[in-house]
Amino acid sequence: MKNNFDQALEWLLVHEGGFTADKRDPGNNGDGHGNQGSTNLGVTSKVWADYTGQPAPIEVMKKLKPSDVAPLYKKKYWNRIKCDQLPQGVDVFCFDWCVNSGPKRPAQALQRIIGATADGVIGPKSLQAVANFDEHEVLEKMHDSRQKFYESLGHFKTFGRGWTRRNDEMLEQAQSLL
């Protein structure tokens, strides 16, 4: 089995950036414990609070380091869609999209592209189907699907340039692994 997680995480963290508490970001809606929403290294206060079982006030969120968030990313996103079993390049692209939009949406997009049942759960049948496809073709179609999703969002006017840049850069990075 291959493992591109470290490379994928490195690229992801460049895209995700550092600490922010942007109220326009729909992901920044608090940690569920009455604390203002914030994000650091791509992890929202709600996701961090759910993962740790502890409140995630801004003071906690500001202190997060890549080594803190790596296990969360591995468990909640990388392993969830079985990236170690996906083709080279497809793994890192799916991981990045999972972090950005949740695991179900990219899993379903991949399944539609490969003709599998689009239930959002990558299992043996999906893994077998994706193995029969050209990685370049899958990546191009994943990129197009992700872009259409972004453009359908109400916040595209505010965040669209960054989302589009991320999608384009991720396609290039994923293709560099082929």
Image: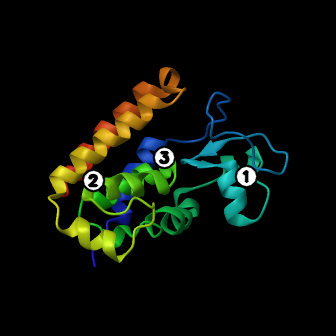
Q: How crowded is the residue under tag 3: few (<14 C-alpha within 10 Å), some, or many (20+)?
A: some
Q: Is residue 80 visible?
A: yes
In the rendered structure, the answer to whether residue 37 lies left or right of residue 130 reads right
Quarter occupied by the C terminus: bottom left
Q: Farthest residue in the right direction?
A: 34
Image x and y of residue 114, in percent: 25, 59
> Which residue position holds label 3?
100
Image x and y of residue 85, in percent: 31, 73
Image x and y of residue 109, in percent: 36, 51
> Which residue position holds label 2?
113
Closer-to-camera residue (114/90): 114
Q: How is the image coloured?
A: rainbow
Considering the numbered disc 3 on the image, is that residue within a helix, a strand or a loop?
helix
Q: Residue at x 45, y 61 (%)?
A: 119
Label 1 – label 2 distance at C-alpha? 40 Å
Q: Earlier in the sequence, mark 2 or mark 3?
A: 3
Q: Residue at x 85, y 45 (%)?
A: 34
Q: Is residue 87 visible?
A: no
Considering the numbered disc 1 on the image, is that residue within a helix, a strand or a loop?
helix
Nearest-to-viewer mark from 1 and 2: 2
Please tell me the numbered disc located at residue 52: none
Label 3 – label 1 distance at C-alpha? 21 Å
> Which residue position holds label 1?
60
Callout 3, which amino acid?
Asn
